[in-house]
Amino acid sequence: MSSSIPPAAPASGAASEADAGPRAGRVALVGRPNVGKSTLLNALLGEPIAIISPHPQTTRENVRGILTVQNAQFVFVDTPGMHAPRTRLGRWMNEHAREAEREADVVVMVAEVPRMEAGAREARPHPADLELAAGLTRLPGARVVLCLNKVDRLKDKGLLLPLIAAFTRACAFAATVPMSAKRSQGIDGMIHELRALLPEQPFLFEPDTLSDQPVRFFVAEFVREQILQQTKQEVPHGVAVVVERFDEGGKIVQIEATVHVARESHKRILVGARGSMMKNIGIAARERVETMIERRVNLRLWVRVTPGWMENAERLRELGYAPPEGGEPKPAAEADT
């Protein structure tokens, strides 16, 4: 059996569209950290391939998921949250998000409905959301859809109208879809709107493809997800995971990976008493991998201290964070925030 990822089930009701010719294209999901981009990707695919945690900047690299529904193929690209970077890694993440915007046929800007304070009479967009929306108008030929996520926060849905109006003043969106990605509400409406915006062209991948990224990529992501979820605030985002071995030749897939941390104190936390923390992380990550590839897995993890890797260009490349086409990210003083 190859290391290809099994296909996901199509989104409920998304197969109702049927035109003469096929449509296919890349759809970039962009937005601030923690607005629900990864949750949206998983809901659209019906498969949890993107990692999720309460921490900001959980998504570091563009994660591609492919959904084929009858005669339409959507190549979704989940991007790192746009933020004011403090490290070379942060600048690298922003540039990858911008690269996805430039290469997309359709851009979905994901914004969250703000939490309403007691006594508030209107919901106002986050200023950074409006700034991002205005920036999207500068993309040449871009078709931009507004995904207004977490609408379940509003008991009075009438408050959505002025909120949407504020966004549309910043950007002429091709469509607006209020939804709750966490509850998979509004998925069919999103598929319907996006399908009409896809170019008329043959499929870009085989219809049963879930992602064109290798399983090794998702192994590293699943390990990092468990580190973020199980260490809470104790270990910051100074963690990188590199898969050193992936051997699927035997009955059981053999995987070995190294977890790089920035400080010795973080290594002690990850290892835990008698290796208990790393054991729990490995078990949970292994279960995620086994579910994805539908095979038994033996996952072995090691922890290594690699000081300052988030600011070192050579170390970033060694850990798989190569700069996107166009060169190194700008220094902090020159980078767009």
Image: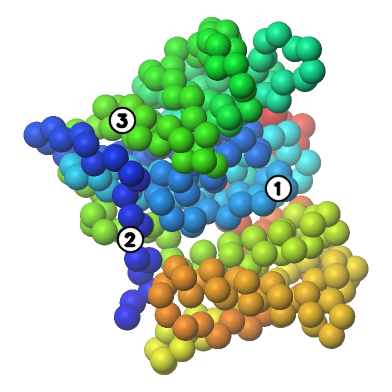
Instruction: Tell me which residue sits at (24%, 32%) in the image.
Output: 199
Nearest to N terminus: mark 1 or mark 2: 2
Left or right of residue 148, residue 115 in this image: right
Q: Is residue 49 visible?
A: yes
Identify whether 133 is placed above or below 91: above
Residue at label 2?
7
Q: Which residue is mark 3?
A: 192
Residue type beneath disc 2? Pro
Looking at the image, is 162 positioned above or below residue 66?
above
Direction right: furthest residue = 265
Lower position in the chain sequence, tag 2 or tag 3: 2
Judged left or right of residue 23, residue 329 is right
x, y percentage for residue 154?
62, 22
Three-letter code for the amino acid on which mark 1 is drawn: Pro
Locate residue 306, reporting x and y percent.
Answer: 78, 68
Q: Which residue is mark 1?
A: 54
Contact between marks 2 and 3 (CB within 8 A): the answer is no
In terms of secondary structure, where does tag 3 sit? helix
Is 331 situated above or below 136?
below
Find residue 103 and report its image quarter.
Answer: top left
Left or right: 77 as drawn, with respect to 203: right
Total labels drawn = 3
**Secondary structure of the residue carrying numbered label 2:** loop
Mark 1 falls on what kind of element?
loop
Residue 170's tag is none
Quadrant containing the C terminus is: top right
